[in-house]
């Protein structure tokens, strides 16, 4: 039985789960629950971003999110209008890229702090948007400068919106 426990501990180590030395092994089901919870949390911070193939500011926004601990998967698309229509982004709230994270839509240069807040609070909205391309937003300005001079809006599928954060 000792050998089997060692195999499980090695598996847990590789999965990134820490055990205290001498902690009794309580069972594979509980272990898998811990591993599953860690995987769910990581998945919640995975951002799928649709962007035009040549848009450098969108890549700058992706880097901003990565620096904040998100995983960003960039999908280059020529048909951004179709993507926005597919996900229900109201035209008046559109920006250059459309991203999906944790069941929400993130449209444009929304700061990572707002995305994290959205995922923590889980309000009943379709997503967040920074309409247009605000000049002093992540990806649009020099790296390291704080956002300034624009609003991030929460929006619903019906096109209604309200202030989420003012910079």
Image (cartoon, rainbow, N blue to C red):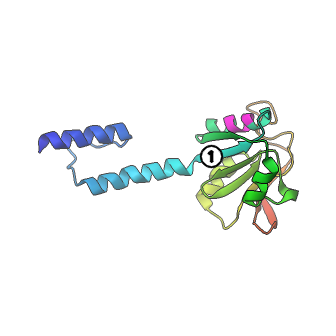
Q: Secondary structure at mark 1?
A: strand
The N terminus: image quadrant: top left
Q: Residue furthest top?
A: 142
Q: Which residue is mark 1?
A: 47
Q: Is residue 9 left or right of residue 115?
A: left
Rendering coords of residue 91 (x, y %)? 86, 57
What residue is shown at x 80% (from left), y 64% (from top)? Answer: 162
What residue is shown at x 43% (from left), y 53% (from top)? Answer: 37
What residue is shown at x 84% (from left), y 56% (from top)? Answer: 93
Q: Residue furthest left?
A: 1
Q: Is residue 41 left or right of residue 109?
A: left
Rendering coords of residue 53 (x, y %)? 76, 35
> Dominant secondary structure of the magenta stretch?
helix
Q: How many marks?
A: 1
Which quadrant would residue 68 be assigned to in this image? top right
Rendering coords of residue 120 (x, y %)? 59, 57
Residue 153 visible in image = no
Which quadrant would residue 143 be assigned to in this image? top right
Most foreground residue, 51 or 65? 51
Say few, some or many: other residues with alpha carbon within 10 Å of mark 1 (under 14 / 14 to 19 / 20 or more). Answer: many
Which quadrant would residue 84 be assigned to in this image? bottom right
What residue is shown at x 64% (from left), y 46% (from top)? Answer: 48
Write down the region rendered in magenta: 59-63
Q: Is residue 62 magenta?
A: yes
Rendering coords of residue 118 (x, y %)? 65, 56
Q: Is residue 81 magenta?
A: no
Residue 29 visible in image = yes
């Amino acid at each position: 039985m000792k050998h089997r426990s060692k195999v499980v501990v090695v598996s847990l180590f590789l999965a990134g789960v820490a055990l205290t030395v001498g902690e009794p092994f309580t069972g594979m089901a509980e272990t898998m629950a811990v591993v599953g919870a860690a995987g769910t949390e990581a998945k919640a911070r995975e951002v799928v971003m649709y962007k035009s193939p040549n848009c450098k500011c969108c890549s700058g926004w992706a880097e901003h999110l990565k620096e904040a601990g998100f995983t960003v998967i960039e999908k280059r698309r020529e048909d951004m209008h179709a993507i926005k229509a597919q996900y229900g982004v109201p035209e008046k709230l559109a920006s250059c890229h459309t991203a999906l994270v944790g069941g929400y839509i993130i449209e444009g240069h929304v700061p990572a702090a707002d995305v994290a807040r959205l995922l923590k609070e889980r309000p009943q909205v379709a997503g967040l948007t920074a309409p247009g391309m605000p000049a002093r937003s992540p990806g649009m300005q020099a790296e390291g400068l704080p956002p300034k001079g624009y609003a991030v809006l929460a929006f619903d599928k019906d096109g209604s919106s309200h202030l989420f954060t003012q910079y």
